Image (cartoon, helix red, strand yellow):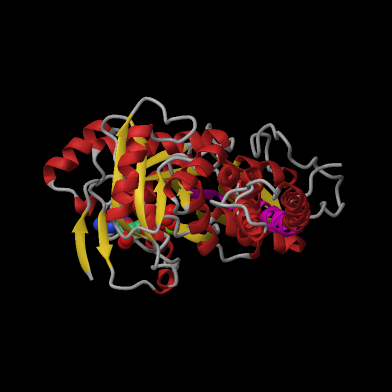
Amino acid sequence: MTTTRSRNGRVAETRGRESAAAGRAKQRALMIGALEAGDDLSELRELLRTAGVAVVGQLVQHRERPHPNTYLGPGKIEELREQLKRSDANVVACDDELSPRQERNLERLLDVPVVDRTTVILDIFAGHAHTAEGKLQVELAQLQYNLARMRGLWTHLERLGAGAGAPGGGPGIGTRGPGESQIETDRRLARDRITALRRRLERVRGSRETMRAERARAQLPTVALVGYTNAGKSTLLNRLTGAEVGVRNRLFHTLDPTTRSYRLGGRDYLLTDTVGFIRKLPHQLVDAFGATLEETRMADLLLHVVDASAPEEDLNEMMSAVDSVLGEIGAGDQPRMLILNKADALDAEQRIDVGLRHPDGLLVSALTGEGLDELGDRIEEEFARRLRDVELLLPYREGGRLAELHEIAGDLVREDTPEGVRVTARVPATVAARFQRYAVGSDGAGPAADGDRPTADGDRPAADGSRPA
Ligand SMILES: Nc1nc2c(ncn2[C@@H]2O[C@H](COP(=O)(O)OP(=O)(O)OP(=O)(O)O)[C@@H](O)[C@H]2O)c(=O)[nH]1
Ligand SMILES: [Mg+2]
């Protein structure tokens, strides 16, 4: 395994063979892109590599906007046809999402299958989804994307057309009748399948809601790792919690959120790894993964992990891509901390430079562990600001409540009295509200926003975490 440094500064490993990709390695792509000045196709190259497709060449056109009918202009299309003849590419991969019309026209002009960025990303997601929910989400996204552009139906039509004697491929004369009804049938089948998938997703999500509700009841502070794909989120989760979440120098390695508990200063936190973001993330995916991304919205704190070893321009672009996805999923206003990861890959000068550019960021290395103590301290500080001191008197028969409090508060001071256990602890405001009925003195839990009302003496308190009716 050799390690090379790609133009964008990320470390890329060149592996001999990739078992997951082996089946598809027969695909050799020629990349095309209508780019703004300064842009290149390195990210599409990474995506294709992740999808197990070899890249055998590229053609770039610098233009303000892609050609509405053919993506590239007529001159470039001619060039592309020539280049295709010379190369052994058997697929053309486009850096942008293509409109159905652009895709169809390109395939006709080039006589090879054309895939766009969205298709590649969907394909990677399909290969990486492991949980039932993840698989359903990807299939739904793929179906919706294909339905919108009737992909596959055209080749289907061509087959029908060929049978009917239409020359030159494409839906020629004589294919209309059967073709149209075929489209209708396929569409109906796709729609039925979409409906079925949605229903199943709802059921899966139902159980997920239950799990989340349980966790919410435990009231452990939740921290979510978010960031561009390949930034090192899973590595960081593993390093901090001793978990063994798969880490690969591949895009979108993690699709299903993984939550682990993370002990810090005598207190348990929940740390959640999330799916990586990317520029131009297909909308179907943002929708399909909405529930997964909800983990992000529910978190008390987001750690925005970035690859600090990426060149400045790339880093800024990746950060703003993350910003916009967070905004789209309604997590734009969550408390956030910037984590500049991969410090080990920076020299002294680069460290100073990145520190100056991101003064609020914390330089760490998930690989060597550098900066992680400081990270722990910052997380503690962040939560400490939201903690409240409570002084409670818990009757002896409420032993379960004491255990619960112990789990949440970590360190607490207890003293046995004839009436019960007297406890002093620092807990999140929501927890303080929930324990208010046991508060000693008036500033025990403060003005509870949504806490339980104190119950009459001798009453059994309501079930854990339940809200007042
Ligand atoms: N040099 C260096 N490499 C790192 C560090 N952290 C992670 N990496 C590498 O970066 C690559 C991606 O790491 P992951 O942890 O899988 O990244 P991720 O953010 O979870 O990626 P997705 O799951 O695709 O979103 C792997 O090759 C890691 O070994 C670090 O601190 N330093
Ligand atoms: Mg990951």
In percent of width and height, residue 210 lies at 73, 57
State the residue at coordinates (50%, 47%): 118
State the residue at coordinates (82%, 51%): 462
Residue 457 left/right relative to 53: right
In percent of width and height, residue 226 lies at 46, 47
In percent of width and height, residue 316 lies at 33, 34
Q: Is residue 70 visible?
A: yes
Q: Nearer the viewer, residue 92 or 176?
A: 176
**In which quadrant of the rendered view does residue 133 lie?**
bottom right
**In which quadrant of the rendered view does residue 397 lie?**
bottom right
- In the image, is residue 466 part of the stretch drawn in magenta? no
In percent of width and height, residue 274 lies at 50, 53
Q: Taken as a whole, is the magenta stretch helix, strand or loop?
A: helix
Dividing the image into four quarters, tell me where ligand 1 lies: bottom left
- Magenta range: 203-224
State the residue at coordinates (45%, 55%): 252
**In which quadrant of the rendered view does residue 337 lie?**
top left
Residue 362 left/right relative to 246: left
State the residue at coordinates (43%, 30%): 67
- In the image, is residue 205 part of the stretch drawn in magenta? yes
Asked if 434 appears above or below 1 in the picture, the reply is above
Q: Quadrant of the C terminus?
A: top right
